[in-house]
Amino acid sequence: MKNKVLVTGGAGYIGSHTCIALHEAGYEMVVYDNLSNSSVEAINRVSALIDRPIDFIQGDIRDKKRLNQVFDEHKFFGVIHFAGLKAVGESVAKPLMYYDNNVSGSITLLEVMMAHQVDNLIFSSSATVYGDPKTLPIDETAPRSCTNPYGQSKLMIEHMLEDLATAYPSLNLISLRYFNPVGAHPSGQIGEDPNDIPNNLMPYISQVAVGKLERLSIFGDDYPTVDGTGVRDFIHVTDLAQGHVAALNYLQQHASSNSSSDAAGSVGFLPINLGTGKGTSVLDLVAAFTKVSKQPIPYQFAARRAGDIASCYASADKAKELLGWEAKLSITEMCQDTWRWQSKNPNGYA
């Protein structure tokens, strides 16, 4: 079926928002998630928002038998692959867990895809594959290197996809390199719900604002930036979700007819940045969130974290040129939607 896709990790933060965008674009989806870092409540809320049940399967991408059953039961056009562990600090402490889940799991998924002649994949990559960039903005030709096992796992998967595209010319493999996803669905019903203490800046700020955490630690005030704090390219998660739909539409238009014997029109390996192209400092984000939430956000400066870089923002020209996609939502809207989600759900999906 040309409009049915498997969404691995579809109960997670970006996956759940993408499910709504897929439905609105007329795609059918099957969500496959082991719920290790997500909640079935997210699926229930997505289902309520789109007013139809979600075909949800609890399973692990390392479980080849289970995956084969899913591919036997459904005729997929392609796969959007979100499933993966994503905490940088945890990856440093438990590198084998990250390589096993992210890399081995992706190998298993790709093997099952190829066995079922499903040639189309959109991979959830990351700007972390660029390491510490030498020039800004970062475009897709920039050198790649990583400073932690999480980033290494993403880069290893990209290398695998490149090698696969060379060996099997019929494959269509888009790697979407996200910058810093933030925000939530405008309904306030789904959003980012990290386990334990948040690893990312925006959920930490919002949990301080809602009174769940005492204060924000800002790591480093002496970077060569506008105010000494790190600068990042924050992108609204609903813009990011639309980027996946645009990539899927691109595959529909350009990929071969889902036949491993026909390489005509195939895409090969195609990396594309998804970002706004604008950098925002940590202090600017705190100020924007304070203005929107009307809540005090106490913070303290702490030492730089190992592996952190001064500035990172995207060149998103390729996404606009190839996919017809560009980010539309502002930092203010990112903060408004995050605050709506956090204030309605102070304990997340719990």
Image (cartoon, grey):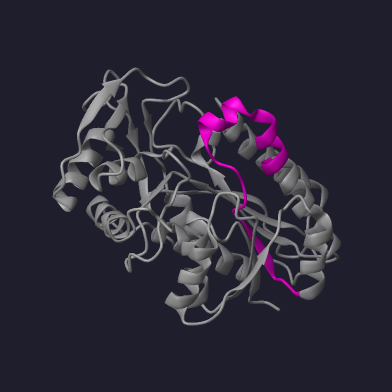
Residue 119 x %, y %: 75, 62
- Give the left or right position of residue 12, taking residue 204 as reference: right
Residue 322 x %, y %: 51, 59
Residue at the outermost front position: 350
Residue 300 visible in the shown view: yes
Q: Based on the picture, tell me whether residue 148 belongs to the magenta stretch.
A: no
Highlighted range, magenta: 74-102
Q: Residue at x 50, y 75 (%)?
A: 47
Q: Quarter-wise, where is residue 344 in the image?
A: bottom left
Residue 246 visible in the shown view: no
In terms of depth relative to the viewer, which is nearer, 164 or 35? 35
- Give the left or right position of residue 147, taking residue 314 as reference: right
In terms of depth relative to the viewer, which is nearer, 326 or 287? 287
Which quadrant is the N terminus positioned in?
bottom right
Residue 134 x %, y %: 45, 25
Residue 159 x %, y %: 70, 39
Residue at the outermost bottom position: 51
In terms of depth relative to the viewer, which is nearer, 312 or 338? 338
- Give the left or right position of residue 209, taking residue 90 as reference: left
Q: Quarter-wise, where is residue 250 in the image?
A: bottom right
Which quadrant is the C terminus positioned in?
bottom left
Q: Based on the picture, tell me whether residue 90 belongs to the magenta stretch.
A: yes
Q: Quarter-wise, where is residue 57 in the image?
A: bottom right
Number of numbered discs? 0
